[in-house]
Amino acid sequence: MKTQYPLMRRLTMAAMLAVGLLGQPAMAQNAASTRNQLTLQQCIDLALQNNITIRQGQLTVQNSTLQLKQSRLNLLPVANFQASQSLNGGRSINVTSNQFEQRTINSGNYQINASATLFNGYALQNTIRQNDLTRQASEEELKATRNTVSLNVIQAYLNALTATEQLVIARRQAEVASAQLDRTQRLVNAGSAPESNLYDLRATLASNELDIVTAQNSLDLAKVSLLQNMNVPVEGTGFDIAPIEVPDPGLVPYTETVQQLYSAALTNLPDARGADLRVRSAALGVEVARGALYPTLSISGNLSSLFSSASQALQPNGKSTQTQTPYFIPDANGGLQPVYTNTPGYDIASIGYLNQIKNNFNRSVSLILRVPIFGGYVSRNRITTAKITQQNSELNGQNIRLQLRQQIETAYANMRAGANRYRATQAQVTALEQAFRVAESRFNAGALGSFEYGIAKTNLDRSRASLVQAKYDYVFRIKILDYFQNKPLSF
């Protein structure tokens, strides 16, 4: 079974998994006090339980395990018992005398056969090794599928968390605008500020309320995506997302190189391990096919007996019959007297069932050597087919490695770009906060118009929202690179 999701997408979500798992203790505490609050682990468990692709992967593993078991059992001898019972009428063969008789005959034949393969070009042993590698590959592919499903849930979960944080920011911005509007209203009522300031602030508040609606819609859509990834019906499902605390990342340069990440990924990722196992399994498939060119040596044994209602035997009855022979002997008078002989009498009787089984018992042992000479090139064509399968598996493995290297290179470049963006956004927020404090002071003092104040506030709000996205993006990019190395996903 091969996964249907791009590896890079799973790796991105693996970094999200790191952040999600770190927040589990805090989520457990929050879940205790929030109604219908789902933690990340609960969402993952539901998705793994409901996902159909995982169930199919589990069946694939069960099937490959059964094939491995059967290939091992194929080394054992094969034994069969065969019995036949026949009723023949008219001119039939008496199986005990092998003669034709004009009568109805009831007969039975019983056999026990056993055979074992002693040598067949190591095809049985190579099949066991091949099926074992196939089972291991199926298990690795199932792990990759589980990762894919889990990471899809994590991505949807963190999308919902990001939308939640954006909603909080939008509400805070609206609260600040509303408070400023109330203050300005009092100043206008007192005659200390022009009424035009109210219109500008009301426009700013309306814009903030629109941001709230947009953020709420994004959150609703993110929850729908999360439920769909868990295969849970959306209708009638109300829940909240348990928060995850993500600390601000540092800006220390990443120490590992692309080559180091690539070498670690080849060892740690189930995708690469599964591809390697498939290549080794295909190589053994060639050896299995080549075994058909070798002679086959086997041994067989047979135990058999039979019964027939036509089987009869002569039994003495104690009577005798005097019969004149063609010989004569001289008597006292000089004549010849005939010679008589006594012939014992016999009755014809059927032989009993158990006696026939005992008397007709037969046993044999055979040593069979089969040497292939010509079979229409079937075996050689099977070898060629197996070699093609092997080459295809090798190309698939090379393609996975190529994609992996390209994805690591892309992830590394994205990490550096994320660091630059986060650093620049941090500096932007710091500068805009200072500018907004000055603008707010001037606005409160009546030295700055409401329009300019609104621009300063809007710029700061957008920069803070960008900083949230830049922070998550940079943290996830770092965790992607950690995931390649199988490092502990902790801060």
Image (cartoon, rainbow, N blue to C red):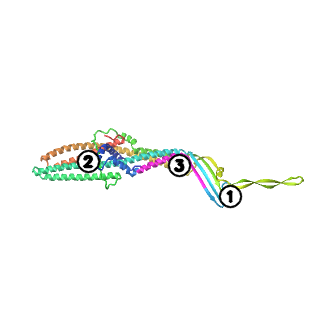
Please, what secondary structure does the residue beneath circle 3 have?
helix
Q: Which residues are magenta?
A: 55-84
- Name the residue carrying label 2: 165
Mark 2 or mark 3: whose residue is earlier in sequence: 2
Please, what secondary structure does the residue beneath circle 1 have?
strand
| Mark 2: amino acid | Glu
| Residue 480 location (% of width, % of height) | 33, 43
Q: Which one is in front in this view, the residue at disc 1 or the one at disc 2?
A: 1
- Name the residue carrying label 3: 380
Taking the image as shown, residue 31 lies to the left or right of residue 289, namely: left
Is 243 magenta? The answer is: no
- Name the residue carrying label 1: 100
**In 3D space, how far apart are the residues under numbered discs 1 and 2 (Cα atoms)?**
99 Å
Query: Of helix, strand and loop, which mostly describes the magenta segment?
Result: helix
Residue 307 in view in this figure = yes
**In 3D space, how far apart are the residues under numbered discs 1 and 3 (Cα atoms)?**
50 Å
| Mark 1: amino acid | Phe
Taking the image as shown, residue 471 lies to the left or right of residue 135, namely: left
Q: Residue furthest bottom?
A: 90
**In 3D space, how far apart are the residues under numbered discs 2 and 3 (Cα atoms)?**
65 Å
| Residue 415 location (% of width, % of height) | 31, 43
Q: Quadrant of residue 309?
A: bottom right
